[in-house]
Image (cartoon, grey):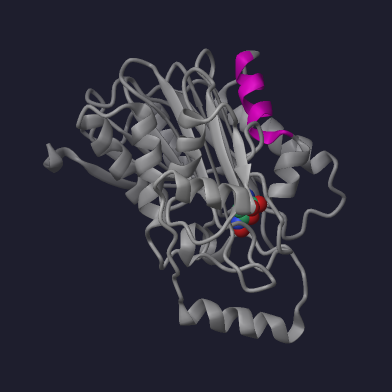
Amino acid sequence: MSDRRKFIKLGVAGTAALVTGCVGKNEEAAGDPKGAGGTSAQAKGAIVLSTWDHGMPANAKAWSVLQGGGSVLDAVEQGVGVIESDFSNRSVGLGGMPDRDGHVTLDACIQDHEGRAGAVAFVQRFEHPISIARAVMERTPHVMLVGAGAERWAQENGFSPRDVDIPEVRKAWTEWLKKGEYVPVANVENHDTIGMVAMDAQGRLAGSCTTSGMAFKVHGRVGDSPIIGAGLFVDGEVGAACATGVGELVIRNAGSHTVVELMRAGWDPTDACREAVQRILRKLPDPSGMQVGFLALRKDGSYGGWSVFNGFNYAVRFTEQEALVDAGHELKLP
Ligand code: SD4
């Protein structure tokens, strides 16, 4: 059916096109993509959503896992795993930007339909932190392992460390050291963390989130991405949400949990993301440089996103249709 596949780059106006179902010949295959309010759109059946443009190849992988009969948990693990293995990506996986001491440290988490969860934080030298996170969920009574303990546990459980030396990254760090200014650097190359939320044809949800975190962060810093309720939250009864951007702001506001709880209270996914962004902004006198984006999927197949600044986009995949959608935003970058 690949001839029926469409790639559509949508702005907010384009989202409205999806909402009203006028994206082309695929409406019947896409179900009835009617809006659920605001600029949310709706899919029937299985759906995969991921943050930023690197979400496109991630979604493609997740979709093929679902099509091949894999579980939604397999899909969200293997989907983001594609980006972890892309060493040209400077914000996810071992190709990411280092901390201020020159170490690439990785954070990831995963959650399933039943709310089971696994996470790793501040781990070095592993290609697939998302798979370690899943293993923590499935093979231990715990949710989160960090640092040296997580690395030792990973090795004991069949994960092999590897060293990846990328001259371009080393050079960027050496340049940064000249001034050594610590300012949050999110949105490297106009994308950062990959968060994925997905639902299979039976309505089972799962989510994943993985990142190399903020460039040149303090050694030991952990962001929102591995924290259940902050970078990711899945509730099989309601929906799922994930976050990207300056993790400190997301953690302080329990961002993804907030979005899911708003959806539980009946909010539309886009409105729920927007309210979470507005809560952050209400406590932030100066939002300069503080990008945060949320992406949400409700159990009825409706989905949406919102961010502090323009520039946040997310990838959508359902039936034979895929799209890159510009999320709505509160503020315009100067
Ligand atoms: C974090 N939300 O660690 C993540 C990713 C990030 O630049 O900020 N990337 O806070």
Tell me: 69 left or right of 117: left
Residue 309 visible here: no
Q: Is the residue 62 above or below the residue 31 in the image? A: below
Q: Is the residue 98 above or below the residue 248 in the image? A: below
Query: What residue is drawn where x is 16% and y is 38%?
Result: 4
Residue 205 visible here: yes
Instruction: State yes or no: residue 274 in magenta.
Output: no
Quadrant containing the C terminus is bottom right
Toward which corner of the image does residue 282 lie, by quadrant?
top right
Toward which corner of the image does residue 233 lie, by quadrant?
top right
Per the rendered image, the range of residues in magenta is 254-264
Query: What residue is drawn where x is 45% and y is 28%?
Result: 206
- Give 250 or 127, whichever is nearer the viewer: 127
Task: Tell me where residue 272 appears, x and y as whole percent.
Answer: 63, 27
Task: Tell me where residue 181 appears, x and y as whole percent.
Answer: 77, 75
Task: Tell me where residue 288 appears, x and y as whole percent.
Answer: 76, 59
Task: Tell me where residue 180 appears, x and y as whole percent.
Answer: 75, 78
Quadrant containing the N terminus is top left
Query: What residue is drawn where x is 44% and y is 70%?
Result: 164
